[in-house]
């Protein structure tokens, strides 16, 4: 019997667990009282880690190539040969990657490095990624979540937009505890929302963005925004306010939301007089909502201070880790973009052989590239139920379809190659919660059969293709150190993502790593990672 402190990994909150295991793959799961994300709380999904999922029933336990079981050596050789052939014939951009939202940061790092630095492709399909990422990058200059869980208890008012928090019971419990301690809860949601609030504004579905954009305009017209903060910390185009005006006066907002003008005015005045507001919203909703929330907080200076911040809730487990490593279609790595300087710096650091020359395709645009014959291969990694239909079409369009999975049921789905991945309870590495909290995922059970970590199989393919000098990883700590060094490399302080303290981390220190948050207090003092130090309206 052993006690292992690890991670739940079932959503973006990043709850810590305390697992009591035995030799028969049986486990008792409880919340880790020492973990800052949940303080011992755990929802039903976390508790279910101890259910029959621990058994090997239904597991893919050996590689399959063209439907036939083979050993790892042959499987790696086949994948390397087929990808090499496609690259030689069709060049950069001919290979695409699909990544689920439940990989570890080390998996994302190696996948992104291999794709962008050696396959020369940024075609990375991430259907779990939400609109808040692009809005934060546009507004702040970097995809940084400014909020922490502790901000919820420090607020005077929590503005809860929609009922997306129901997917995060531990986070909801934190909100309810804050309300019991005297924090006011204002809910913007449709009728029937199962959340008790001090004020419930029953808005029409999809209209919350109009209400918040109206609050931005109302504050401007009434002179309620912090003029000093605006002048010092926000670059506002001359035509912005005139462009915002159509459709955002109180009467137009009333028609859009279904609220009375009186209720709207009262809400706007309450916002203007409350200094410490945390706005929680579902980041998977429209980009308009993310922009409206961020803009309202920027204009009123309610950001970069304890208890005053926008807070985009992310659904995917370790989706933040994917964004930090750049394992998405529209950024390079370590919160860098595709500018010439960023590409050159990343290429030097990686020793890249064929660097992606710009953002890649995803979603429908990527499917169209497959239909047109521009993309010839897809490697899909990680569980992603939301992508089943997309994957079903994609693998029928291309000659080479590789799937890394822990589920045997996928063998009949038309994949050229199936590679057995580690199940969650067999994974070892790190992940980042939605509030920038980095925690250790520790393996609860040994790898089953011939299952291997996703980073391992990516590394072996890279080595088989002749890139052993750049892919020399033997353990997750090797990858974590390199990821940390890349966030430091060429970073003169302009980017907040800087893991300098862990660039030299030893293997024992990595094994014993306790939760820590990068970024300190983002945007403290109204300083943003943009060329002029000022934010922009999203």
Image (cartoon, rainbow, N blue to C red):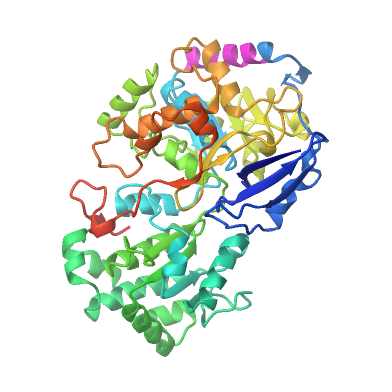
Decide if residue 337 is on the left or right side of residue 404. Answer: left
Q: How many marks?
A: 0
The answer to whether residue 392 is magenta is no
- 412 to 301, vertically: above or below: above
Measured from the top left, where is residue 116 in percent x and y?
Answer: 43, 27
- 315 to 209, vertically: above or below: above
Q: Residue at x 38, y 34 (%)?
A: 332
Observer able to see residue 422:
yes
Observer able to see residue 369:
no
Residue placed most toward the observer, 530 or 305: 305
Quarter location, residue 407? top right
Residue placed most toward the observer, 394 or 465: 465
Measured from the top left, where is residue 38 in percent x and y?
Answer: 57, 57
Quarter of the N terminus within the rendering: top right
Residue placed most toward the observer, 492 or 108: 492
Q: Residue at x 65, y 29 (%)?
A: 404
Residue placed most toward the observer, 11 or 215: 11
The outermost residue toward the bottom is 262
Residue stretch rendered in magenta on the structure: 75-90
Dominant secondary structure, magenta: helix
Q: Residue at x 29, y 26 (%)?
A: 345
Quarter location, residue 448? top right
Quarter of the C terminus within the rendering: bottom left
Measured from the top left, where is residue 206 in percent x and y?
Answer: 50, 68
The answer to whether residue 80 is magenta is yes
Q: Residue at x 29, y 59 (%)?
A: 537
Measured from the top left, where is residue 426 in percent x and y?
Answer: 68, 34
């Amino acid at each position: 019997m052993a006690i292992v402190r690890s991670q739940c990994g079932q959503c973006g909150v990043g709850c810590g667990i305390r697992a009591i295991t035995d030799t028969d793959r049986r486990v008792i799961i409880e919340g880790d009282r020492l973990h800052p994300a949940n303080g011992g709380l755990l929802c039903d999904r976390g508790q279910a880690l101890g259910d029959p999922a621990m058994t090997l029933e239904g597991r893919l336990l050996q590689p399959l190539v063209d439907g036939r079981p083979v050993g790892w050596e042959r499987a790696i050789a086949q994948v390397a040969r087929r990808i090499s052939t496609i690259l030689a014939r069709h060049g950069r951009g001919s290979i695409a990657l699909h990544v689920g939202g439940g990989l570890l940061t080390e998996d994302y790092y190696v996948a992104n490095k291999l794709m962008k630095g050696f396959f020369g492709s940024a075609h990375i399909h991430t259907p779990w990624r939400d609109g808040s990422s692009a809005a934060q990058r546009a507004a702040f200059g970097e995809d940084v979540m400014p909020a922490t869980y502790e901000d919820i208890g420090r607020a005077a008012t929590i503005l809860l937009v929609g009922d997306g928090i129901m997917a995060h019971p531990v986070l909801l419990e934190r909100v309810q505890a804050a309300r019991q301690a005297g924090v006011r809860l204002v809910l913007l949601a449709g009728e029937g929302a199962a959340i008790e609030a001090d004020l419930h504004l029953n808005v029409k579905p999809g209209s919350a963005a109009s209400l918040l954009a109206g609050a931005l305009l109302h504050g401007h017209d009434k002179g309620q925004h912090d003029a000093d903060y605006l002048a010092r910390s926000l670059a506002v185009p001359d035509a912005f306010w005139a462009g915002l005006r159509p459709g955002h006066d109180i009467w137009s907002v009333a028609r859009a939301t279904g609220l009375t003008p009186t209720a709207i005015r009262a809400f706007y005045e309450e916002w203007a007089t409350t200094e410490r507001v945390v706005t929680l919203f579902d980041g998977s909703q429209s980009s308009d909502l993310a922009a409206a929330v961020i803009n309202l907080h920027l204009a009123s200076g309610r950001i970069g201070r304890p208890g005053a911040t926008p807070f985009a809730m992310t659904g995917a487990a370790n989706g933040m880790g994917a964004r930090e490593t750049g394992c998405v279609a529209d950024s390079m790595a370590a919160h860098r973009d595709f500018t010439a300087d960023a590409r050159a710096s990343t290429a030097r650091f990686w020793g890249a052989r064929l660097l992606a020359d710009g953002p890649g395709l995803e979603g429908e645009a990527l499917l169209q590239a497959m239909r047109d014959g521009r993309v010839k291969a897809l490697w899909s990694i990680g569980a992603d139920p939301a992508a089943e239909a997309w994957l079903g079409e994609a693998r029928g369009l291309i000659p080479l379809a590789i799937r890394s999975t822990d589920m045997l049921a996928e063998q009949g789905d038309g994949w050229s190659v199936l590679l057995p991945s580690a199940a969650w309870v067999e994974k070892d590495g790190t992940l980042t919660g939605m509030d920038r909290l980095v925690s250790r995922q520790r393996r609860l059970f040994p790898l089953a059969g011939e299952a291997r970590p996703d980073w391992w199989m990516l590394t072996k393919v890279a080595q088989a293709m002749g890139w052993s000098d750049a892919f020399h990883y033997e353990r997750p700590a090797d990858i974590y150190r390199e990821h940390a060094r890349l966030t430091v490399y060429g970073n003169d302080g302009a980017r907040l993502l800087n893991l300098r303290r862990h660039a030299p981390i030893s293997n024992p220190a990595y094994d014993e790593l306790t939760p820590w948050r990068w970024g300190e207090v983002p945007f403290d003092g109204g300083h943003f990672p943009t060329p002029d130090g000022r934010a922009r309206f999203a």
